Image (cartoon, rainbow, N blue to C red):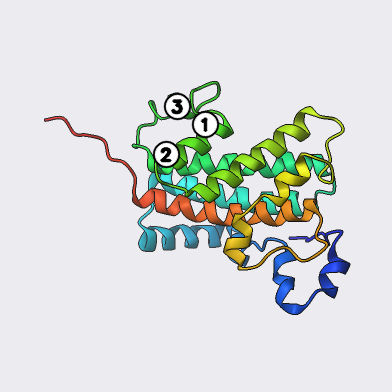
Amino acid sequence: MRHHQPKWTAHYLQTPIEQRVYLSPVCIPAWIKYLHNNDMRKAAIDEGRSQARITGKALERYFALNEALFLFSDLFQEEKNERAAAIVGAAFLDTILEHILIAFLVDDEREVPKLLGIERPLATYGSRTTLAYCLGLIPKTIRDDLRLIGKIRNRFAHDLRASFDEEPIRTWCLSLKWHQISMFMSPPEGARPAEIFQVGLNQLVTYLNGVVGIARTEKRQLIIEH
């Protein structure tokens, strides 16, 4: 997997060692690469079944999300266009939110899509964020950061002059909180809003990816009628 050196690499290398982790691009576990090898993929599936007890459609979704994570890393880290980065980043968060809700809701392939499918009540990024919060799957800080990412995405999608360095996008980026909590540090002095957006979104991806597994263990069960 290729890694594009961000525009701020020079600044990153000049920062104290304790701050360098802040500007490090998201790292995709090496084992995800192995999923492109059929034999190793089968071995990973067997291990997943024995250790995590994931089977059937849930197992398919598990590997589909990891494949998407791999693709997202390539697209997001290689993307030089700010508008595309904002839209791609938010789109992937939306994908993870969908996986979280599917993992948590009852296992009914006919009814669940009536909520999450295209032009359905929970088809939008905003509605999925709100529901995940109301179900107790994400805390307020994550909810607020997701909403800020949504605002940034919408601004880039509808304003041809949008820029990370201009208001209100600049303020929205500086208002992202989870990355500071999860990394125990504030952005280095001089970090651009676009860089803060990238780090903030990466940290949200990491957090939500873990929530998928938690939602799976708390999955709602169908009521069996007697």
Q: Which mark is residue 115?
A: 3
Query: What secondary structure is found at the residue carrying circle 1?
Result: helix
Looking at the rendering, in which quadrant would you find the N terminus?
A: bottom right
Which residue ends up furthest to the left in the rendered image? 226
Q: Which mark is residue 54?
A: none
Which residue ends up furthest to the bottom in the rendered image? 17
Task: Please report whichever mark, 2 or 1, sits nearer to the chain's N-terminal start.
Answer: 1
Residue nearest the observer in this picture, 69 or 10: 10
Residue nearest the observer in this picture, 183 or 112: 183
| Coordinates of residue 221 in the picture (x, y in percent) | 27, 40
Residue nearest the observer in this picture, 95 or 37: 95
Q: Which mark is residue 134?
A: 2
Identify the residue at horizontal 35%, vertical 32% (top origin).
108
The residue that label 1 is drawn on is: 127
Q: Nearer the viewer, mark 2 or mark 3?
A: 2
| Coordinates of residue 198 in the picture (x, y in percent) | 72, 53
Identify the residue at horizontal 49%, vertical 56% (top origin).
210
Task: Please report whichever mark, 2 or 3, sits nearer to the chain's N-terminal start.
Answer: 3
Dots 3, 1 in contact, CB < 8 A: no
Residue 58 visible in the snapshot: yes
Mark 1, other Cα within 10 Å: few <14 / some 14–19 / many ≥20: some
